[in-house]
């Protein structure tokens, strides 16, 4: 057939059979989480009340490959391997000599990469007899993904959804209900943390940090309930590496190798999922693929925050983790990329960036939506606003390649579709969106809340 | 690998290279469309003002195979071949000895099977220099699909959307805007037909018949504009046969053969797309696969309407076509499966049913949504309410197999996802939906409007 190929599909049998643990390949190990009371490394016992043991073992593991159980692969196979697509139409629209590829994770029933870990987490919880899981969600991608996974394994699911997103994206809640989960806006009056925040500010739009605190309180307070996190932690990033492992095989099918690999970065999980196997090859095989993390200018954790020990949540219930952070009290502007509105970043992605294995860049909201429209009108998939940040950086790379008159092979992660974000597109097309100046003052103030590490 | 396989994927290179034209295999040719002024068969000249010649040739063709141009295959390959999935989790939930498979068309960027024909139609219009296309849409699936296809080929797109759906599903319009199309609620005041209907009934909820009339008037009145229809016509059904052609290969991969093949039926295109290749095999290879069309009880065209010559639209602008019909003035209740709210049916599917090549069954709204929830909580994909009608019939077949204690292989078309139908799920879960009694009286009254064929 003479039709140019644009999609590189792997058969089900090529679904990765093990996750890749980058910790095994890092020259310098990432600093451990600390118990905030003692300043000493936090052992698994600190987190045992809220996570099943199998996940804690993965959290602490230094093994390079961790086998994926058959039941998880079976569930993955409803949508995995996900497609790798050559963006020929986008290349044409940009008139660039660059070759652009994207890995498309929106094919999952929840519409994003999140089920790669929610399925694994629900499975291990089920194995250890857990009957109910609590969690938080920003834009709703994670809550939907966990609701879906809990539905597979017959587990009750309770989701605290950041209030501004709950109202911006009401159909995300409908989706969770359809899968049998409960979803309420956060801050809520069902937890002490929520009640306290509402008493101080009844109109609080919520934040991921607050919602995490509520979900943690829920799990700590109930015997039948464990907690589940959709990003940030090592085991979550580990589960996402199926993305990059598949992409490497698919790029080989395409007979191409990326010069630059790009992921949008909120907590860090879709970014890590794609780029960790590439960073691994840079370290172990001496390759020099450029790696880029993209965040919104409105929440410039990686580009404006210091690398410091901080809490993962607003109520300071988590262990201290070393990460880029804007301070756990930081509440970013209500931009439409709700999944990127997080004060911190994964300790592992932070470590990779601080060690020089990855660049980080912040892009403004309007340029991001302009890229999303260019993409939708050429490649035809309507991207999630979060994923549009990766598109924005890819477009910049393609334009730079054109300017330099050089071929450049660009690979990015299209982590989800925008079917539940159409109000954001309406607002953009109606000219109602704005950029957000770097909130320097707000950042400075928020950073004053950074904790003192005992004994440091 | 010992993991049970549930997805059967074809590589891009196995995308069908020709569409299957069932007309070539039918023992008795379907009766021709008639010119309503003369009662004589309508030649291509009658439709030439509104359709490009290549599509009219396909409309009249008796060739068994019609080559698919490379540019269309290239566009198909963004999402085709679509997956065939073994519904192992649904089988378990139903505790049935039946083996259930579904072909999943929701993987297209517009979320349904509709792009299989919108891409082809936009392509042929582009080839003949058309710069603007008008159309109607019910629930928005078709309008989105045409907006998407027009975006690929750089054609302006104007969509008249049935008013009740326009308000039920506002984000379908956003989707069309994102792809650069214009979409307004029908009846509108931009056409004579629309103004006339609004003068009589300012609160008219609209219907597909009315929206078709408006889109036709738009196309007839402008030199630069052709019209495009998302179902009913022969060439539309032809383009959809890629679904069944792929499914046949995939069932072979699965080592199974369906006893019964099921599609939901509004205008008839997704049903025809899956079942026509199977009906063809029944005719030419002496197979005896059962074929089932499923419609809503609230709009029982196939099960309560007579087979008669009728207009395709409310304003009686189309040629007369022989089909099952409730009368072109029939306005069905505002059920959530907007894509199935059509007074008529495709002449070709009507012919197949009246000749005994297919059964037809009507299912009530509540049982349909109950099936959709069962499906969403087992298979995890949230189906469009239209597609849920096929699920409902498949569940009935699976239960019958259980009762009879027999294996039965069931194949149905999951024509689209329900991401833009979450309000319907909210209403169902809140107990706000009802069944609709067969509107016998309304049907009787509507049937009085059936046209007299001149000279008949």
Image (cartoon, coloured by chain):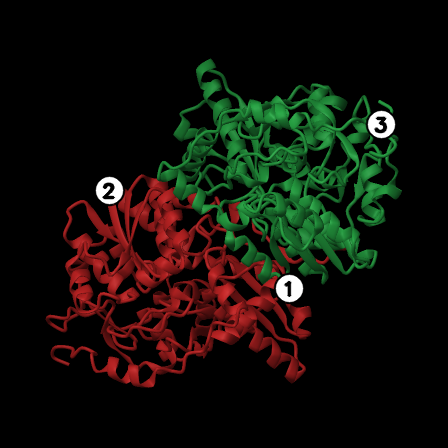
Chain colours: A green, B red
Find the distance from the CA under tag 1 to the CA under tag 3. 49 Å
- Dot label at residue A331: none
Q: Say which quadrant the C terminus of chain A sits in.
A: top right
- Closer to the observer: label 3 or label 2? 3
Question: Height in image: B422 above or below B262?
Answer: above
Left-right relation of A154 to A440: right
Find the distance from the CA under tag 2 to the CA under tag 1. 45 Å
Direction top: furthest residue = A404
Question: Height in image: A354 above or below A224?
Answer: above
Q: Which chain carries label 2?
A: B
How many numbered circles does the render carry?
Answer: 3
Instruction: Kindly identify the residue that appears in the image at 23 percent across and 44 percent down.
Output: B130
Instruction: Kindly identify the residue that appears in the image at 18 percent across and 70 percent down.
Output: B34
- Dot label at residue B131: 2
Would residue A237 be seen by someone viewing this image from the given angle? yes
> Whole-percent x and y of residue B217?
18, 57
- Which of the 4 image quarters holds residue A426? top left
SS category of the residue bearing label 1 = helix
Instruction: Kindly identify the residue that appears in the image at 59 percent across and 50 percent down.
Output: A108
2 or 1: tag closer to the N-terminus:
2
Q: Mark 1 lies on which chain?
A: B
To which residue does mark 3 refer?
Answer: A454
Classify mark 3: residues with Cα within 10 Å, few (<14), some (14-19) or many (20+).
few
> Whole-percent x and y of residue A360?
61, 23
Q: Are marks 1 and 3 on the same chain?
A: no
The answer to the question of whether label 2 and label 1 lie on touching residues, with beta carbons closer than 8 A, is no
To which residue does mark 1 refer?
Answer: B378
């Amino acid at each position: 057939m003479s039709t140019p190929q644009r999609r590189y599909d792997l058969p089900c049998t090529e679904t990765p059979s093990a996750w890749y643990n980058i910790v095994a390949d890092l020259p310098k190990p990432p600093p451990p989480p600390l118990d905030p009371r003692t300043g000493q490394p936090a052992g698994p016992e600190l987190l045992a009340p809220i996570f099943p043991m199998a996940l804690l073992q993965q959290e602490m593991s230094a093994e390079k490959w961790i086998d994926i159980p058959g039941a998880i692969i079976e569930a993955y196979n409803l949508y995995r391997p996900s497609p790798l697509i050559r963006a020929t139409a986008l290349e044409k629209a940009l008139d660039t000599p660059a070759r652009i590829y994207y890995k498309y994770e929106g094919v999952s029933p929840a519409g994003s990469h999140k089920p790669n870990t929610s399925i694994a987490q629900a499975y291990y919880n089920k194995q250890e007899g857990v009957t109910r899981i609590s969690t938080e969600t920003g834009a709703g991608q994670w809550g939907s993904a966990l609701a879906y996974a809990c539905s597979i394994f017959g587990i009750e699911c309770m989701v605290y959804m950041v209030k501004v997103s709950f109202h911006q994206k009401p159909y995300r809640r409908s989706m969770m209900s359809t899968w049998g989960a409960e979803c309420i806006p956060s801050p809520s009056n069902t937890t002490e943390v929520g009640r306290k925040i509402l008493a101080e500010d009844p109109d609080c739009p919520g934040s991921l940090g607050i919602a995490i605190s509520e979900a943690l309180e829920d799990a700590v307070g109930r015997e039948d309930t464990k907690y589940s996190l959709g990003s940030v932690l090592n085991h979550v990033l580990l589960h996402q590496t199926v993305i990059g492992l598949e992409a490497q095989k698919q790029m080989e099918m395409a007979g191409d190798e990326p010069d630059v690999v790009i992921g949008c970065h909120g907590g860090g999980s879709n970014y890590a999922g794609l780029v960790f196997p590439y960073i691994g090859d840079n370290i172990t095989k001496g390759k020099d693929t450029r790696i880029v993390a993209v965040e919104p200018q409105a929440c410039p954790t990686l580009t404006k925050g210091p690398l410091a020990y901080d809490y993962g949540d607003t109520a300071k219930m988590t262990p201290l983790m070393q990460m880029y952070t804007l301070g756990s009290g930081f509440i970013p502007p209500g931009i439409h990329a709700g999944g990127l509105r997080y004060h911190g970043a994964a300790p592992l992605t932070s470590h990779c960036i601080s060690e020089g294995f990855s660049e980080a860049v912040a892009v403004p909201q309007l340029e991001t939506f302009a890229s999303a429209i260019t993409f939708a009108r050429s490649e035809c998939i309507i991207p999630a606003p979060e994923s549009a940040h990766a598109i924005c950086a890819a477009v910049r790379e393609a334009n730079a390649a054109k300017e330099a008159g050089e071929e450049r092979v660009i690979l990015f992660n299209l982590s989800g579709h925008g079917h539940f974000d159409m109000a954001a597109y309406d607002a953009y097309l109606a000219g109602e969106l704005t950029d957000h100046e770097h909130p320097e003052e707000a950042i400075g103030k928020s950073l004053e809340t950074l904790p003192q590490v005992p004994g440091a």
